[in-house]
């Protein structure tokens, strides 16, 4: 093979690779530009009483600039107290739920990035399976731990899952893959995040149980009254479940 022939082959291969990349980029753009799925009710209408053994201690509202950074105004950020636990410090748990639709920035905020940016030191990262009784299925959950720089004898323990069109993911990578599912013509995603602040016993298995219970209660209410019905993300909605009566009003 002559030098000129080799150059011609290399040039042709380069054109094929560049062309394939362009096509892949166009296909990716096509898959992520999907119709909106509005939330059925504003998250601010969610009642802490619907979560069971929890009472509301504080409800945080973000500034206009912080909402713009968050990328959605559909959120709740609550500090809750578990009535079953007598020690107030141990009873405290934070619940942060966000809802996105009709946006192109895919899952911009996850604890493994946001907490270090706030000055916390990563101290644990695990993938878990939580059995969600209200769904009769297991979901993927991520558990993280963070150390404050000034007080490293305590940890903040965070659990989260990302619901993309009714499927649950423990990180952005699989969530984005689901977002690219060509069968889905509409798209929403919602993150349920639970944090136990200032824990000295961060390895206590009871935290997993408490996180699972609160996540189960939250997911039940969200599917009952807030998140779109499973199946409605596709044009063929014949398989979508019929709305159910709810007693959460």
Image (cartoon, rainbow, N blue to C red):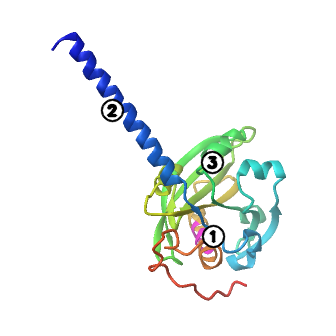
In front of the other: 115 or 172: 172
The numbered mark, 2 or 1, whose residue comes first in the sequence reads: 2
Viewport quadrant of the N terminus: top left
Kindly indicate the quadrant of the structure image that contains residue 218: bottom right
Residue that carries the numbered disc 2 in the rendered image: 16
Q: Earlier in the sequence, mark 1 or mark 3?
A: 3
Asked if the residue at tag 3 contacts the one at tag 1, i.e. Cβ–Cβ closer than 8 Å, the answer is: no
Q: Is residue 26 left or right of residue 80?
A: left
Q: Is the magenta stretch mostly helix, strand or loop?
A: helix
Residue 235 point in image, percent of width and height: 48, 71
Identify the residue position indicated by label 1 in the image: 214
Can the viewer see residue 174 in this picture?
A: yes
Judge depth for marks 3 and 2 and give the one in front: 2
Q: Which of 57 and 112 is in front in this view?
A: 112
**Tag 3 residue:** 108
Disc 1 from disc 3: Cα separation: 24 Å
Question: In this rendering, is residue 240 above or below 198?
Answer: below
């Amino acid at each position: 093979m002559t030098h000129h022939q080799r150059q011609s082959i290399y040039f042709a291969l380069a054109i094929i690779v560049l062309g394939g990349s362009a096509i892949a980029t166009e296909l990716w753009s096509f898959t992520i530009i999907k119709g909106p799925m509005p939330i059925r009710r504003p998250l601010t209408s969610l009642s802490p009483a619907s979560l069971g053994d929890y009472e509301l201690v504080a409800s945080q509202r973000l500034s206009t600039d912080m909402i713009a950074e968050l990328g959605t105004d559909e959120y709740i950020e609550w500090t809750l107290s578990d009535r079953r636990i007598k020690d107030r410090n141990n009873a405290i748990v934070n619940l942060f739920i966000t809802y996105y639709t009709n946006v192109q920035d895919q899952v911009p905020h996850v604890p493994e990035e946001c907490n270090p940016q706030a000055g916390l030191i990563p101290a644990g990262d695990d993938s878990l399976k939580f059995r969600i009784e209200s769904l009769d299925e297991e979901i993927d959950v991520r558990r993280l731990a963070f150390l404050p720089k000034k007080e490293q004898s305590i940890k903040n323990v965070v659990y989260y899952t990302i619901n993309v069109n009714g499927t649950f993911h423990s990180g952005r990578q699989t969530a984005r893959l689901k977002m690219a599912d060509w069968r889905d013509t509409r798209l929403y995603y919602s993150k349920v995040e639970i944090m136990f602040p200032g824990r000295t016993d961060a390895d206590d298995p009871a935290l997993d149980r408490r996180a699972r219970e609160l996540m189960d209660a939250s997911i039940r209410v969200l599917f009952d009254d807030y998140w779109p019905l499973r199946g409605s993300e596709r044009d063929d909605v014949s398989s979508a479940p019929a709305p159910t009566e709810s007693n959460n009003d």
